[in-house]
Image (cartoon, rainbow, N blue to C red):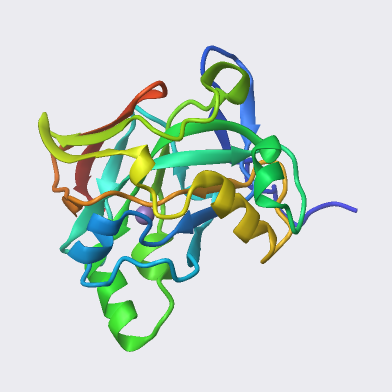
């Protein structure tokens, strides 16, 4: 059997202090997982079950890249997020077992066409056009659990052109990492290479052409993205 044309290259992420890379399988993103961000989006922060949306694996972009200002939006937003990388698959994973399924952690930026996301929300349409566009998942080098442990607290910060826009602590997550992994695994079988973007704190806002956006998480380093000209 031959393919009719070359398959796309495998999307992958860097590993901190290593030449090896992690193949990306799927990207799951948690909506509204910090109370103050839920409020700024006009929603009650509560313990309703978390909801997820997805991005394609090849939306992944490394730190240090310039990405074009995406099409169809006039309100292109940053979202600082803790990234969880799954190393061992499974289904119906108990919360107390879920940390065993994590390979490592990274710093991420869930880029969002906010105007399209809000329009979809209002009209009861899918979020894909607001969230799952090209180059919409900035993910830094992945730190293995053996070195980084399982960060459950620590600073998460985002700056635009050096000005602080988001400044929170990982301990403010409404749904913790073990809870998220367990809940996701009851919805579908998770697999090595699956990536979870765990939600953003308050302070989301726009990026424009020429901006430099830096996200930092205590113990996981920082990622930097420049916004280039419109496509
Ligand atoms: Mn997000």
Furthest toward the right, the residue is 1
Query: Quick check: can you spot residue 218?
Result: yes
Name the residue: 32% across, 54% down. Answer: 34
Residue 133 percent coordinates (x, y) = 40, 59
Q: Nearer the viewer, residue 70 or 43?
A: 43
- Residue 184 vertical placement versus 125 (above, below): above
Name the residue: 43% across, 68% down. Answer: 128
Left or right? Give the position of 58 relative to 111: right
Q: Nearer the viewer, residue 135 or 138?
A: 138
Q: Nearer the viewer, residue 34 or 123?
A: 34
Furthest toward the bottom, the residue is 123
- Residue 62 vertical placement versus 112 (above, below): above
Residue 126 percent coordinates (x, y) = 43, 77
- Quadrant in the picture for residue 129: bottom left
Total count of labels: 0
Left or right? Give the position of 10 relative to 217: right
Name the residue: 38% across, 50% down. Answer: 136
Residue 14 percent coordinates (x, y) = 53, 26
- Residue 178 vertical placement versus 105 (above, below): below
Name the residue: 62% across, 19% down. Answer: 146
* Quadrant assignment for ligand 1: bottom left
Left or right? Give the position of 122 relative to 184: left
- Quadrant in the picture for residue 186: bottom right
Residue 12 percent coordinates (x, y) = 58, 35
Query: Quick check: can you spot residue 73?
Result: no
Left or right? Give the position of 94 relative to 65: right
């Amino acid at each position: 059997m031959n393919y009719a044309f070359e398959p796309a290259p495998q999307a992958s992420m860097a590993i901190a202090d290593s030449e090896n890379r992690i193949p990306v399988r799927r990207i799951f993103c948690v909506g509204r997982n910090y109370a103050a961000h839920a409020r700024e989006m006009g929603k009650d922060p509560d313990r309703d079950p978390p909801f997820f949306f997805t991005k394609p694996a090849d939306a992944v972009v490394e730190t240090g890249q310039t990405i074009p200002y995406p099409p169809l939006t006039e309100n292109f937003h940053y979202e600082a997020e803790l990234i969880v990388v799954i190393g061992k698959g499974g289904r119906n994973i108990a919360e107390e077992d879920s940390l065993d399924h994590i390979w490592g952690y990274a710093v991420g930026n869930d880029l969002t066409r906010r105007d399209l996301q809000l329009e979809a929300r209002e009209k009861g349409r899918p979020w894909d056009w607001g969230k799952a566009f090209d180059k919409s998942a900035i993910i830094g080098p992945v730190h293995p659990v053996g070195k980084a442990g399982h960060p459950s607290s620590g600073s998460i910060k985002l700056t635009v052109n050096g000005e602080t826009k988001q400044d929170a602590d990982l301990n403010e997550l409404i749904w913790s990492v073990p809870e998220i992994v367990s809940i996701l695994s009851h919805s579908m079988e998770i697999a090595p290479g699956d990536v979870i973007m765990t939600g953003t704190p308050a302070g989301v806002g726009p990026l424009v052409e020429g901006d430099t956006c830096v996200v930092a998480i205590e113990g996981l380093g920082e990622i930097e993205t420049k916004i280039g000209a419109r496509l």
